[in-house]
Image (cartoon, coloured by chain):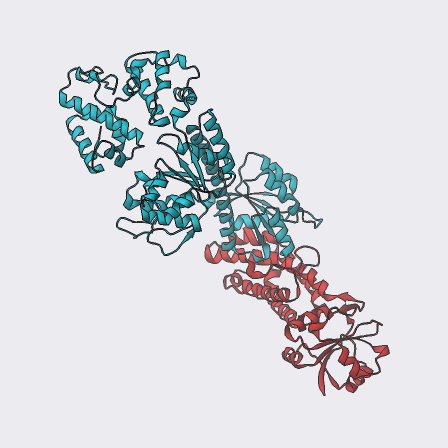
């Protein structure tokens, strides 16, 4: 916005001063004027918007500093209108009092200097606008954070979950304690971390969650701690890391058991000194970040095997909270189903048989698996044009526990219990190669979900040496059967450079 | 023999006082504030004697605070002594009607400026207080407030003309004429004439004389309401006003406490 569009209200009993200021700054600002209190508030209560108020302190012949008395009321009633005191009185007491009461600046008429005054007017107006924008943005951040917390509700009424919530609430009152969340994959470690954030002293501050396994080892240090321009090939500008982004808030480091020794040392240093040093920098930066770590691995075993530093482990286990697997708190399953189906009465969406199957299933992938199963079942029901989800809509591992092998139906071309095929639900007309691809992709899809999209773990689970082999296999399937990939959103997302639908 | 300076304050030095100081080993020399050398004399003098109160324009004035302030900055070892016809009890005050019998002892017990806690409560109008009002932003006594309004207009007019190339007739019509500089100047001059002679026997007298001379140069331009474009174009008017302001600022900075320092901006 050009400064010409800024609208300034002058309040001064000296009408000559009004006229002089208007004339001097006629090219820079728009002006309106008031000579006394009543007129001032009439203008402010009117339709016109003002960006700045220039307030003289002496507004009548009484020589009392009426302007000083007006400042608090102006600040209270019109908080977005900055006030600059413009007066002949330069006594320190007056300046201090005016600033204490809420004036943004103080200009002495005797010191009039066009450029300086113009600069101050603009600075105060733009500073005020920035503050207003900042407030709007903060409100937006709070709103989004609230939405985010709603998106990650900590659902459960089992005794275990009630106890964990109680502990998290107590821990949240200790904004500097390091928390280690353990538990099988999919048990809701990030949800627990967000719950901790939402309850505690840092709830209005940032929350950053990062899955350390999902980041290449070579990039991990700069991703966490940031880097300076030129620190390595491709570092074309300074970049903040997750730690800096989470400053004053909480940083959740998921899969902490997977980081290498170098990062372990740097993390330990941060936990002990609260200092980080970005890659390529020669200066430490002090940060105020509460670290919440999470892992599904047994860190004590990793320490014993020498893969994890004992000193870091000691530091991390200041407060360990173990999240129970879903199979040990079956009474939470209906609650979770109600939440993910967005339906209070499960009977309206699930047949009794389906409900029983879901309640009796082991849920190895825990809540994440349950959530994905819900999406799967809903889609299956839509494809099969069913109003309620029955046992035929359930994933095959639920109806046929322990099976990750080829079910008998595969040989007859019926994949309905395993995967979704919009073009051919029955699988009729597929050749054996396509059928094999379908089964392989289904397995990879499920493993990706179970392993939280950690390709390394998926590759290991299916007996591949490394992620390159997995990528090769995906690529092969895509070259031959690209149409199958529409049914595998997790694979498509994880390998979006290969899978271009 | 040490040198002691004295300021008569409108009345001749009583011979009895000169004799008193002679007996104490001091030769009293009148301090001529009109001479440029007076600051050097003060720095080398052992004592400065003020005859209080000053008698000027039919008023009894007290310049003690201003001299105290000046000596604190410039010659803190100097003794600031006072003489009056009033029976005032103070280590640095002499009652002329009842001089101490032992001049040497009296001089020895008087404080140097740097150690003085207060001034003798001689009756009269305190010029320090008057100077405060001189600089006060509002009020009938303020010299600076009126000059400030004049300078504001001249500064804006000069900028318009020199930086924005606005024709002077327009500037005159929009800015200078409405400001009624002739009336303001007359107001300022009236106040000034009443004020500045009061400070004749104070350390700011020289600066005030300098301002008075500068003001004379502005007289014609101001009294025609600022019609003469040339004086504005060549910057003479603003320069003189700035010189006056600078002198006033120096006085304010040294003698008027509790003000914003100028570098604050």
Q: Is residue B200 visible?
A: no
In the image, A104: left or right of B197?
left
The one of A158 and A467 positioned closer to us in this rendering = A158
- Residue A344 lies, with reference to residue B161, above or below; the image says above
For the C terminus of chain A, the quadrant is top left
For the N terminus of chain A, the quadrant is top left
Q: Colour of chain B?
A: red
The residue furthest bottom is: B1
- Residue A446 lies, with reference to residue B147, above or below; the image says above
- Residue A464 lies, with reference to residue A308, above or below; the image says above
In the image, A247: left or right of B76?
left
**Residue B207 point in image, percent of width and height:** 63, 70
Chain rendered cyan: A
**Residue B189 point in image, percent of width and height:** 67, 62
In the image, A329: left or right of A398?
right
The one of A128 and A277 positioned closer to us in this rendering = A277
What residue do we see at 64% from left, 77% from top?
A: B39
**Residue A268 point in image, percent of width and height:** 39, 48
**Residue A152 point in image, percent of width and height:** 42, 29
The residue furthest front is: A304
The one of A53 and A397 positioned closer to us in this rendering = A397
The one of A45 and A420 positioned closer to us in this rendering = A420
Q: Is residue B143 visible?
A: yes
What residue do we see at 28% from left, 46% from top?
A: A218
């Amino acid at each position: 916005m050009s400064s010409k569009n800024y609208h300034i209200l002058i309040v001064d009993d000296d009408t000559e001063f009004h006229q002089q200021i208007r004339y001097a700054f006629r090219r820079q600002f728009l002006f309106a004027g008031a000579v006394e209190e009543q007129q001032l508030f009439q203008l402010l209560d009117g339709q016109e918007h003002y960006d700045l108020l220039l307030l003289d302190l002496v507004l009548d012949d009484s020589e009392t500093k009426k302007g000083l008395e007006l400042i608090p009321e102006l600040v209270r009633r019109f908080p977005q209108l900055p006030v600059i005191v413009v007066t002949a009185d330069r006594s320190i007491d007056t300046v201090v009092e005016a600033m204490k009461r809420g004036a943004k600046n103080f200009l002495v008429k005797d010191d009039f200097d066009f450029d300086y005054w113009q600069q101050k007017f603009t600075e105060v107006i733009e500073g005020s606008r920035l503050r207003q924008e900042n407030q709007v943005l903060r409100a937006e951040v709070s709103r989004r954070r609230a939405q985010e917390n709603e998106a990650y509700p900590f659902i459960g009424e089992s005794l275990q979950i009630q106890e964990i919530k109680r502990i998290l609430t107590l821990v949240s009152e200790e904004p500097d304690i390091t928390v280690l969340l353990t538990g099988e994959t999919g048990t809701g470690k990030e949800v627990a971390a967000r719950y901790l954030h939402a309850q505690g002293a840092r709830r209005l501050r940032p929350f950053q969650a990062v899955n350390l396994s999902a980041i290449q080892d070579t990039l991990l240090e700069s991703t966490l701690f940031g880097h300076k321009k030129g620190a390595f090939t491709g570092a074309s500008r300074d970049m903040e890391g997750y730690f800096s982004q989470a400053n004053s808030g909480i940083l959740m480091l998921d899969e902490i058991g997977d980081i290498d020794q170098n990062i372990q040392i740097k993390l330990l240093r941060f936990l002990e000194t609260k200092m980080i040093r970005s890659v390529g920098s020669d200066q430490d930066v002090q940060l105020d970040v509460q670290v919440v770590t999470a892992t599904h691995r047994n860190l004590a075993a990793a320490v014993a095997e020498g893969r994890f530093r004992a000193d870091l482990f000691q530091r991390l286990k200041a407060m360990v909270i173990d999240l129970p697997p879903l199979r040990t708190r079956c009474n939470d399953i209906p609650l979770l189903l109600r939440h993910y189906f967005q339906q209070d009465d499960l009977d309206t969406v699930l047949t009794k048989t389906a409900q029983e199957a879901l309640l009796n299933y082991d849920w190895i992938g825990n809540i994440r698996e349950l959530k994905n199963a819900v999406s799967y079942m809903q889609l299956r029901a839509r494809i099969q044009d069913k109003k309620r989800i029955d046992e035929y809509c359930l994933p095959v591992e639920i109806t046929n526990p322990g099976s990750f092998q080829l079910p008998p139906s595969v040989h007859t071309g019926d994949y309905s219990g395993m995967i979704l095929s919009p073009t051919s639900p029955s699988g009729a007309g597929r050749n054996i190669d396509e059928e094999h691809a379908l089964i392989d992709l289904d397995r990879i899809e499920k493993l990706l979900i179970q392993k939280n999209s950690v390709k390394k773990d998926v590759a290991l689970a299916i007996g591949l040496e490394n992620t390159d082999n997995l990528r090769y296999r995906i690529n092969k399937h895509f070259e031959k059967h690209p149409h199958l990939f529409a049914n595998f959103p997790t694979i498509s997302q994880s390998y979006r450079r290969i899978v271009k639908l | 023999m040490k040198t002691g300076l004295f300021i008569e304050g409108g009345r001749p030095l009583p011979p009895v006082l000169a004799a008193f100081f002679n007996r104490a080993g001091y030769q009293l020399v009148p301090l001529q504030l009109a001479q440029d050398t007076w600051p050097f004399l003060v720095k080398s003098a052992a004592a400065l004697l003020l005859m209080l109160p000053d008698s000027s324009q039919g008023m009894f004035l007290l310049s003690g605070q201003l001299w105290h302030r000046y000596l604190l900055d410039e010659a803190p070892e100097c003794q600031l002594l006072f003489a009056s016809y009033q029976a005032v009890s103070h280590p640095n005050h002499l009652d002329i009607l009842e001089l101490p019998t032992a001049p040497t002892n009296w001089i020895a017990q008087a404080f140097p400026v740097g150690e003085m806690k207060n001034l003798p409560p001689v009756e009269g109008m305190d010029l320090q207080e008057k100077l405060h009002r001189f600089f006060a932003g509002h009020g009938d006594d303020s010299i600076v407030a009126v000059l400030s309004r004049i300078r504001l207009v001249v500064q804006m007019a000069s900028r318009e003309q020199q930086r924005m190339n606005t024709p002077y007739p327009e500037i005159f019509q929009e800015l200078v004429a409405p400001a009624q500089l002739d009336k303001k100047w007359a107001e300022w001059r009236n106040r000034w004439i009443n004020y500045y002679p009061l400070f004749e026997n104070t350390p700011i007298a020289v600066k005030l004389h300098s301002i008075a001379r500068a003001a004379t140069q502005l007289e014609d331009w101001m009294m025609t309401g600022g019609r003469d474009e040339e004086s504005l174009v060549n910057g003479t008017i603003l320069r003189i006003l700035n010189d006056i302001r600078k002198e006033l600022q120096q006085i304010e900075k040294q003698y008027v406490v509790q003000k914003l320092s100028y570098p604050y901006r």
